């Protein structure tokens, strides 16, 4: 996933440079540039439409998203986790502190 992210960022930087040079590009031009860009980095090109039907891929994506979403909702946020840790530390400190003696001034 990290490699895909790096390729995407690099290509978008390239595309932005092309746009700043005001070079008119059509979709067919972008497809050719992307293929050239991937070949330059020695990355494989997808030949054809692939092996998975769009409907099957969409079902898989939806199932994965639902599983992730369920975990994300049930997991505490970073703020909640820090709060729980702070409460635990406060209770630990409170347990170590001697209790005040009653009746003494």
Image: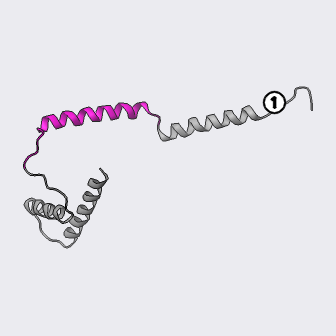
Residue 102 drawn above or below residue 10: above
Report the magenta stretch's main SS: helix
Q: Position of residue 14 (x, y in %)?
A: 23, 66
| Foreground residue among 60 and 28 | 60
Q: Is residue 61 magenta-colored?
A: yes
Quadrant in the picture for residue 15: bottom left
Residue for badge 1:
99
How many neighbours does mark 1 have within 10 angstroms: few (below 14), some (14-19), or many (20 or more)?
few
Residue 39 drawn above or below residue 99: below
Residue segment shown in magenta: 48-76
User: Residue at (12%, 68%) from the top-left corner?
Assistant: 24
Q: Position of residue 97 (x, y in %)?
A: 77, 35
Residue 1 drawn above or below residue 95: below
Residue 34 drawn above or below residue 76: below
Q: Position of residue 79 (x, y in %)?
A: 51, 40
Q: Position of residue 98 (x, y in %)?
A: 81, 33
Quadrant in the picture for residue 87: top right
Could you tell whether 90 is left or right of 85 in the image? right
SS label for mark 1? loop
């Amino acid at each position: 996933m990290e490699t895909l992210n790096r390729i995407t960022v690099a290509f978008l930087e390239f595309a932005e440079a092309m746009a700043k040079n005001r070079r008119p590009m059509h979709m067919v031009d972008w497809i050719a540039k992307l293929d050239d860009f991937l070949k330059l980095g020695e990355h494989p090109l997808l030949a054809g439409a692939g092996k998975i039907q769009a409907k099957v891929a969409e079902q898989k994506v939806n199932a994965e998203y639902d599983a992730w979403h369920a975990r994300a909702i049930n997991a505490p946020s970073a703020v909640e986790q820090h709060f729980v840790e702070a409460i635990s530390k406060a209770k630990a400190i409170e347990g170590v502190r001697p209790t005040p003696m009653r009746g003494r001034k």
